[in-house]
Amino acid sequence: MLDRITPVVLTRDEEPNIGRTLGQLAWARDVVLVDSFSTDRTVEIARTFPNVRMIQRAFDTHAAQWSFAIGQASTEWVLTLDADYFVPQAFVDELTRLEPPAEVTAYEAAFRWAEGGRLLRATLYPPRLVLVRRDACEVWQDGHTQRIRTAGTIARLDQPLIHDDRKDFRRFLARQRTYMRQEAEKIRKSSFRELPLSGRIRKLRLVAPLASLAHTLFVRRLILDGRAGWRYAFERFLAETMLSAELWKGTPGRLVRLPLRLVPRKARMRILSGELRGWRWIAGAATHGCWLGTYEKRTQALFRWFIQPGDVVLDIGANTGFYTLLASKLTGSSGHVYAFEPMPRNIDYLKCHVKLNAVRNVTILPLAAAANSGKARFRLGANASMGGLANDGELEVPTASLDDLLAAGRISIPDFIKMDIEGGETDALRGASAILAARTATIVLSAHGYKHYEQCSEILQRAEYRLELLRDGAEDGDYLLVAKPPLTAG
């Protein structure tokens, strides 16, 4: 099994850790190390290991960096390692004996925590997917870090990895300041009900630091680990304090928005501003920005710029219908909008919004655009605007390729396509060869993750579309791309 695995490591100024980590990977024929232009001896140390293949790439986001790094491996399996992970021999022995069934696409490992080389009896560090099939995974940004999701079954490894970061306290503080700003932004964007228990405690601000200190010292009994246990508990306390401070920022603005919580979720509102001013909207269908008219003003402007009266529009990932209504208005009675949405809750709102506004030029297609027609599993996201096709999804939904729908006469050749389907963009484009070959449609596409951005760009460039990147994914791993037909088309 070991010859089927490529360890992948990311680094930036990891001089205190990298030699120890790479030293445990002598069993690997090829180790991919992607360095973000370290300024210490990280690169020098890495070059002393003959099995290490080093690539330098400027850091943008964790998700983009990991997507790039995983793409450099040539083996079926990839072992994803932070530079401060220590790989014990018992873990290597388990990998040697591993015989993955065909349905397993990833393995999760637990972690033990070490402070200055001393193992602690417990940690708050969660299990993570570390061994993944290279062609069956994607990386996405989740707050301050990346997550890996995979299509298939996830199994659990018996042996843990060890987290043992030897960088100094100054580096710890600098890193945590950055991480907690990103984590605070994630928590702000999520409602209380959407968050897990840990996120709900953090949203209470003052509670989280003290709860963390009590939990690590007494519930997890790290007080028995002496100075190392106290140091770990103190570091967690500091990190949670930084997060609480970040969450307090902007509180006056949130107090101004507090009255919005008093608006009944079933209230039928008039949209107050923007392109849909005066149209009707159900308050609880999506973010309040929809009925306030402030929702994604940049994308609203793109719709106004590209959609003309009489156009045929495909709204792929219609959600509860904000852009469906906007396209309906812009294309007028002589045009038509096809709204694709597989999630039952969203379909109900979508139908209500079409009916509320007496729209006559919209066809709702309750399915997911995909590479092939049939059925697929759909995984629900943290909120109603998220979710996508995944083998481990809770729902079964119908799917259809755009080309099949075109051939069956269920849709027409489009003039404009909006696509925002949480990682399903690549497969949807693969199922749209005939539509792309027609070269009539301007496409506004949200690609979720660097991997999908690259794949979508490649498909569109092969079809000779002209690409313009409007959002580069540096903030959260989401890319906004406009693809225009060739100038000679038509």
Image: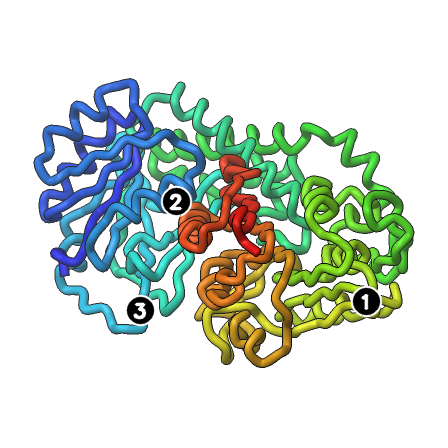
Q: CA distance from mark 2 to mark 1?
A: 51 Å
Residues packed near mark 3 inside 10 Å, few (<14), some (14 to 19) or many (20 plus): some
Vertically, is 38 above or below 222?
above
Per the model, the C-alpha gap separating discs 3 and 2 is 27 Å
Could you say which is closer to the camera, residue 300 or residue 385?
Answer: 300
Q: Residue at x 57, y 75 (%)?
A: 405
Q: Which residue is mark 3?
A: 104
Q: Nearer the viewer, mark 3 or mark 2?
A: 3
Q: What amino acid type is highlighted by mark number 1?
A: Val
Q: Is residue 439 visible?
A: yes
Local secondary structure at mark 3: strand
| Left or right side of 279 for 24 | left
- Give the foreground label among 2 and 1: 1
Q: Going by the image, does 215 lie left or right of 304? A: left
> Where does label 1 land, which residue?
354
As drawn, 35 above or below 96: above
> Can you identify the residue that label 2 sits on?
123
Choose the circle earlier in sequence order: 2 or 1: 2
Count of numbered badges drawn on the protein = 3
Residue at 60% x, 37% y is: 185
- Can residue 285 be spotted in the picture? no
- Quadrant location of the N terminus in the rendered image: bottom left
Classify residue 54 as left or right of residue 477. Answer: left
User: Callout 2: few (<14), some (14-19), or many (20+) C-alpha neighbours within 10 Å?
Assistant: some
**Quadrant placement of the C terminus:** bottom right
Image depth: mark 3 or mark 1 in front: 1
Tags 3 and 1 touching, CB below 8 Å? no
**Residue 363 position by quadrant:** bottom right
- Residue 37: quadrant of the picture: top left
| Element class at badge 2 | loop
